[in-house]
Amino acid sequence: MGRRPLPRLRLGSAGGTPLVPPGRGRAFARSTADGVADVLQPLVALSRGLRVLAAVGRRKWTELPGDRRGPVFTLAVACG
């Protein structure tokens, strides 16, 4: 089974002018990237906050004596 050739840039009726100007593709890609960034911005903020909370919880967990970790873990699992 042979490989298919890559698609060619379609030219207009004049024979040398492309149908889509080269700068338009970049503008479309840039606007798409901006839209994706706007959608993902709340997720980035939430992930940063969760990372801070996890670091605080990890530090508190290591400061907690070993005999108290069992009940605290049980309470955390029950709340979660």
Image: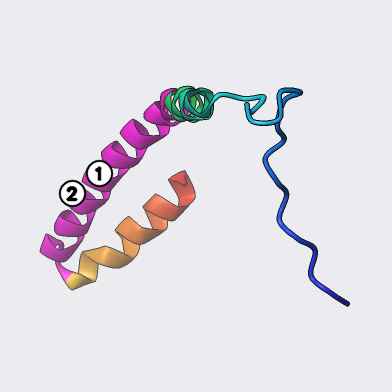
Residue at the extreme right: 1
Is 68 located above or below residue 60 in the figure? below
Circle on res. 56: 2
- Which secondary structure, mark 1? helix
Prevailing secondary structure of the magenta residues: helix
Q: Residue at x 45, y 30 (%)?
A: 33
Q: Residue at x 55, y 24 (%)?
A: 21
Residues at circles 1 and 2 in contact by the CB criterion of under 8 Å: yes
- Decide which of 2, 56 is in the foreground and name it: 2
Q: Position of residue 54 (x, y in %)?
A: 27, 50
Q: How many marks?
A: 2
The CA distance from mark 1 to mark 2 is: 5 Å
Q: Residue at x 44, y 31 (%)?
A: 40
Name the residue carrying label 1. Answer: 53
Is 60 located above or below residue 46 in the figure? below
- Kindly indicate the quadrant of the structure image that contains residue 45: top left
Q: Where's the N terminus, which quadrant?
A: bottom right
Q: Position of residue 44 (x, y in %)?
A: 35, 36
Q: Residue at x 39, y 52 (%)?
A: 75
Q: Which residues are magenta?
A: 37-65
- Decide which of 50, 19 is in the foreground and name it: 19
What amino acid type is highlighted by mark number 2?
Answer: Val
- Kindly indicate the quadrant of the structure image that contains residue 34: top left
Please state if 13 lies on the left or on the right of 48 as rendered: right
Q: How is the image coloured?
A: rainbow
Q: Position of residue 11 (x, y in %)?
A: 70, 32
Please state if 40 lies on the left or on the right of 24 as rendered: left
Query: How many neighbours does mark 2 have within 10 angstroms: few (below 14), some (14-19), or many (20 or more)?
Result: few
What amino acid type is highlighted by mark number 1?
Answer: Leu
